[in-house]
Image: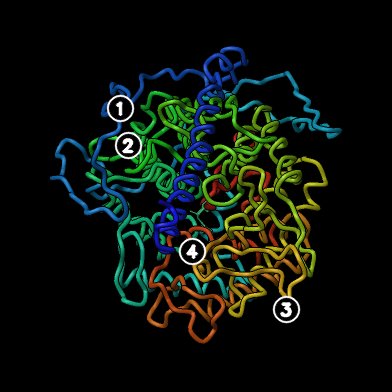
Amino acid sequence: KWKQLSRLQQNMIIFLLAFLILCGFLSYIHMADQWKALSGKPTEERKMMPEIPPVLPAPQKADASPAFSKMLPQRPRKHFRRGPPHLQIRAPNTDSKAGTQDDTKEQAAAPGDAHQEENTQRTVISWRGAVIEPEQGTGVPLRRAEAPAKPSPLVTRMQKEPAVLNERQEGVMEAFRHAWKGYRQFAWGHDELRPVSRSFSEWFGLGLTLIDALDTMWILGLKQEFEEARTWVSQKLSFKKDVDVNLFESTIRILGGLLSTYHLSGDRLFLRKAKDFGDRLMPAFMTPSKIPYSDVNIGTGVAHPPQWTSDSTVSEVTSIQLEFRELSRLTGVKKFQEAAEEVTRHVHHLSGKKDGLVPMFINTHSGSFTHLGVFTLGARADSYYEYLLKQWIQGGKQETQLLEDYLAAIEGIKTHLVRHSEPNKLTFIGELTHDRFSAKMDHLVCFLPGTLALGVHHGLPADHMELARALMETCYQMNRQMETGLSPEIVHFNLYPPTDNLDVKVKPADRHNLLRPETVESLFYLYRTTGDRKYQDWGWEILQSFNKYTRVPSGGYTSINNVQNPHKPEPRDKMESFFLGETLKYLYLLFSDDQNLLSLDTYVFNTEAHPLPIWALS
Ligand code: DMJ
């Protein structure tokens, strides 16, 4: 019968069989991962592990979250909206004064004698020969914030007396003013400027760019712009809206932005807004596993995962802790810190890691990692590593589990992900998929040299600095080797000598640049920690490239589609809020020679570049 079939029919049958076998094989791999994940015993393991002592003592006051405090764990709903929402603004609530009337300026009250307990126990951590001791005189971060922390006198003074700027800082100032001009004219109060079409786009409908940029304006001393934005926050910003927000994105940009602006300005309006917003995010944590859903409606209090899965992204659920912990410290309401730290504890005990490296997804029902065997330092995992270190710093270097996880992860990175490219032997971080190495690196990974340098500044092993310097050079080359001098979103490194002299290859789909901050963020840390001026020079080159290829004459800067075509970079017509919140702020700090301008010993920057105080030293 087979022989009677035509060649075409035979080929079709062979193709069909091959396809079915391939599908079977792939689903077997997928199922095997799921079974492996489910066979872990997180609950039992959790019982056996010692609890991290709470950083805050129990609050004296009752929990002040009337709206959501009695809610039960929620099941995901079937229908959900993704992407830019159609806002349905509810009728104003008459029983609340929040958000719609002009708040008179509320400066922070003189700090009360914030209750602070001394911990006499000193912890020593030994990690493969490196001994790390908490710094002398660093108190344990057990404190109840009955009164708000005192705003930094240094930064307050800065705002009153404009500092003398050097030429490069003036360059950043000019860039900021130009960006702000576009936002103010065409997108005021909206989420993002679309500079080419002179319009705006909405994501959450909460004035994202304005909030993200508040502390940058304060730091740059842009008084008039700051005051105008403050008035908008006071008169127009209301969180009483039927709108879905992404928990991670809104935490790092909105909550983080409000908290840092409160610290810098001492204006309690920002703390009040932060508390209101924090309350509205809390339903996201009401899941069977306590691993938060990715999205929450801040008006209705209904939280849910993305439409296609009940998984959350690992970096998202593990990069909200700096902000929630700080909110608890300031308000004395411990639920924020407890919910966020429960996630940290849970992830600490999970199986599915590889030498400290974490997978990219976690299930909100089972609480287990999913899609096992895939490891990256890029999208969906990046800031997990960053927040291990930064929480440890925030809490006065007392929470040793965080440090242990961070140190283990750096060793895992060195063992599994670090390679060298051809022909210039650049050190880069690749990805691992079921033990197969891929020489792919997201620009997002360029946060890592800065994070490593920050760790060394706080006493971590010196060999981290070697890796930081090498990776910094690589990130610079990811910009330099492009025709526009701007990095693409993703590069692939050559593992074998190429015909040209370039180490990086870029796929057509990855050639865009979204005005991201990671390279200049790391340049800031590298300059602060080494004093090597070449890092300032590299940052200056990048700012000039932004000016040459992304600046829109009528105001604003735009992301571009093609960093390899200087003649036609193709504007994407969008200025992301992090360009003002992060990129320009880090450039300004990079060009400053004042080590005390947001000192690394006093502040820790959240993953959106919003400085929050280090507790023990504040
Ligand atoms: C920012 O929102 C944050 O830096 C986040 O950690 C990663 N993505 C953007 C910037 O690239």
2 and 3 marks in contact (CB < 8 Å): no
The percent coordinates of residue 148 (x first, y second) are: 47, 35
Considering only order in the chain, which callout, 4 or 1, is on the residue closer to the N terminus?
1
Q: How is the image coloured?
A: rainbow
Q: Amino acid at mark 1?
A: Gln
- Label 2 secondary element: strand
Question: To which residue does mark 3 refer?
Answer: 500
Q: CA distance from mark 3 to mark 1?
A: 56 Å
Q: CA distance from mark 1 to mark 4?
A: 35 Å
Q: Which mark is residue 74?
A: 1
Between disc 4 and disc 2, the foreground one is: 2
Give the residue drawn at x 64%, y 31%.
Answer: 402
Considering only order in the chain, which callout, 2 or 4, is on the residue closer to the N terminus?
2
Question: To which residue does mark 4 refer?
Answer: 579
1 and 4 marks in contact (CB < 8 Å): no
Give the residue drawn at x 31%, y 75%.
Answer: 198
In the image, taking residue 278 as reference, residue 86 lies left or right, namely left
The quarter of the displayed image where residue 41 is located: top right
Q: Dot 3 surroundings within 10 Å: few (below 14), some, or many (20 or more)?
A: few
Q: Amino acid at mark 2?
A: His
Considering only order in the chain, which callout, 3 or 2, is on the residue closer to the N terminus?
2
Give the residue drawn at x 45%, y 35%.
Answer: 327
Q: Amino acid at mark 4?
A: Phe
Look at the picture and state if 138 lies above or below 103: above
Question: To which residue does mark 2 refer?
Answer: 304
1 and 2 marks in contact (CB < 8 Å): yes
Between disc 4 and disc 3, the foreground one is: 3
